[in-house]
Image (tube, coloured by chain):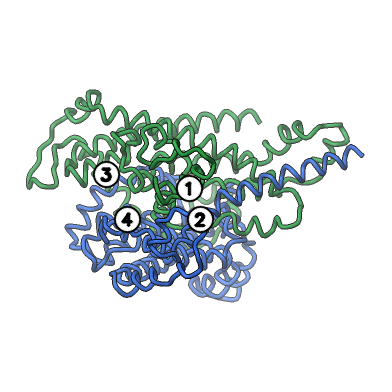
Chain colours: A green, B blue
Amino acid sequence: METNTKPYVAHRPPPRFVWKEKYTGYLMLIPAVAIIMLFTLYPLLDGLKMAFTNRNLLLPSYEYVGLSNFAELPSDEVFRLSLSHSIILTVTVVVLQFILGLILAWAMQQKLPGMGLFKSIIMASWVIPVAATVYMFRFMAQPDVGLVNIILRLLGLKHLARYWFGDPTAALPCIILLHLWRNVPFYGVAFLAAMQAIPRSYYEAAEIDGAGGWSKFRHITLPGIRNMIIVMVTIHVLWTFNNFDFIYLSTGGGPVNRTDVLPVYVYRLSWESYRLGYAASVGTVMVIILLIYFIIYLRIHERSGAAR
Amino acid sequence: MTTKSVRIRTAILAYLVVVISLIFFTLPMLWIFYTSFRTQASIFTGAVISPLKEYTLENFATILLVTDFPTYFRNSLVIATTVTLLSLFCSIIAAYGLSRFDIRGKNTLIVGIFATQMFPQVLLIIPMFLVLFSLGLIDKIIGVVLGQMILVLPFQVWMLKGYFDNLPPEIDEAARMDGCSIPRRLISVILPVAMPGIMVAAFFSFVVSWGDYLIASIICQTQRTATITLVAQRLGASLLVRWGQVAAACVLTIVPTIILFSFVQDRLVEGMTAGALGAE
């Protein structure tokens, strides 16, 4: 064992803490890496390959059809709608979550009676199953027995009462609301944790210089929670763009494709139309969009890292 | 004087945010909880408050005794527990290896593991279904467990690695000097200290598995394996008019996650973002 240890450790600055038990580290990775390879990496490569076939779950054989799945995409009305809805939904949801999360964190940062209790219950919406969340909201949106419409009728706005998830203009905003309901508290609590790690002395120094509330927020708080913002926004862009169950369970993409997004379209193509090859080509477009996002993100990350 | 009036204004604004948030984030849950105790007739009056005699436990009785809900519930419990134990085993040793051992290309590997989270699951499940099909694992509990592992494992490894990085290396170094083997070091030295982080990791995988709809919906073909998130669909559209029963099923689905949440609430965000802050 010891004979094999020489070259690469020597000319490399030693990491913080290293043992000589050379192969143990690799052994420990095997179970996790094996599962990730078999159920993520292999499916990913296979899925990308499948995008070039006409594979159908109901047909025993399939063949490679080159780019013809992709050639079909531009003329596919549902694909075009899903693509634009996916992008609109992701951008709107993440921007609103970020702003509302900051406001929530600001409020929770104030040392006021009852704030501890508030902080401890506010994240409950994040832990309950999405399916339960969707049915809760579908019930509240019911035309006759839903709480939203009951309240509207009490306010004398009877003409506004409707099944909100079935309304062509209201359906997408309702989906946005579901996303906000689930994730804004998570943003708030995460931003709060990062804010509390900023040393008090920074604020005191700024106060001596006569900085106002906004200026302190702009020049101390925001830079101080920068890393947390990057992590939260990155996670939620991926999460929102790839999210499937909110829309599938609430509107199924309707009414008349008004809420169709790419993940829901891929799911319907593969498990309702059984067109695995075509579904994989739509999935491949999703991968390409995510890669573009990832490259832009890395560029911004590098540039701001270099500027500091 | 002015600082005092600023303080009061701040407090009023903060409480305003708190009150609006409380209404928005808890009302849907309270409302479904309330509905689960109402009779069908009382729900359909469209009134918010009904006479006392219209409150009932009948919805829960029907869901638990007449429908197949208990089967779904038990399946979910078995699956989520297995996912939690299996993913903890894999992620703890992998995170410990990544945190404490010299591994060539470590950073690439960590980024690679995290990047797997980025790919659309709706695309991954197509080949995954075919893999599980050829292994004969469709409609098997273990098939669902393996499928759900990919939802939790990458994030869990990343999160626990960050957590282990923050533990002082002296503690396991001391154990090594005493001649402890690696498993002994991990089990009797690291695990007790890392328990808060591991609890959060366990909570995370249980909740993700419990709430998963996507993977369950394609792998669970029959009632033998169907999980709790499939209840509403599989119990038939007729249920959707009986809102009292839907509400009772919702409450029974939510309650386990809320109970577990109450154990980790304070540490949840700290644990989940350890990877983010530890990676710097």
Q: Which marked residue is nearer to the observer: mark 4 or mark 1?
A: 1
The kind of secondary structure element at disc 1 is helix
Alpha carbon separation for disc pair 3 and 4: 23 Å
Alpha carbon separation for disc pair 4 and 1: 19 Å
The kind of secondary structure element at disc 4 is helix
Location of residue B230 with respect to A72 vertically, above or below: below
Determine which residue is flagged by label 3. A267
Query: Of marks 4 and 2, which one's residue comes earlier in the chain?
Result: 2
Q: Nearer the viewer, residue A261 or B252?
A: B252
Count every numbered label the image shows and give the total. 4
**Which label was assigned to residue A137?**
none
Q: Which image quarter: residue B122?
A: top left
Q: Are the residues tagged 4 and 2 within 8 Å (C-beta)?
A: no
Q: Are marks 1 and 3 on the same chain?
A: yes
* Residue A194, image x, y percentages: 66, 47
Residue appearing at x 8%, y 45% in the figure: A59
- Which of the image's four quarters has the N terminus of chain B? top right
Alpha carbon separation for disc pair 4 and 2: 20 Å
Alpha carbon separation for disc pair 1 and 3: 35 Å
Residue appearing at x 52%, y 73% in the figure: B187
Q: Is residue B20 visible?
A: yes
Chain to which the residue tagged by mark 3 belongs? A
Q: Are marks 3 and 4 on the same chain?
A: no
* Residue B98, image x, y percentages: 49, 56
Determine which residue is flagged by label 1. A150
Location of residue B84 with respect to A73 vertically, above or below: below
The kind of secondary structure element at disc 3 is helix
Residue appearing at x 72%, y 42% in the figure: B13
Amino acid at circle 4: Leu
Q: Are the residues tagged 3 and 2 within 8 Å (C-beta)?
A: no
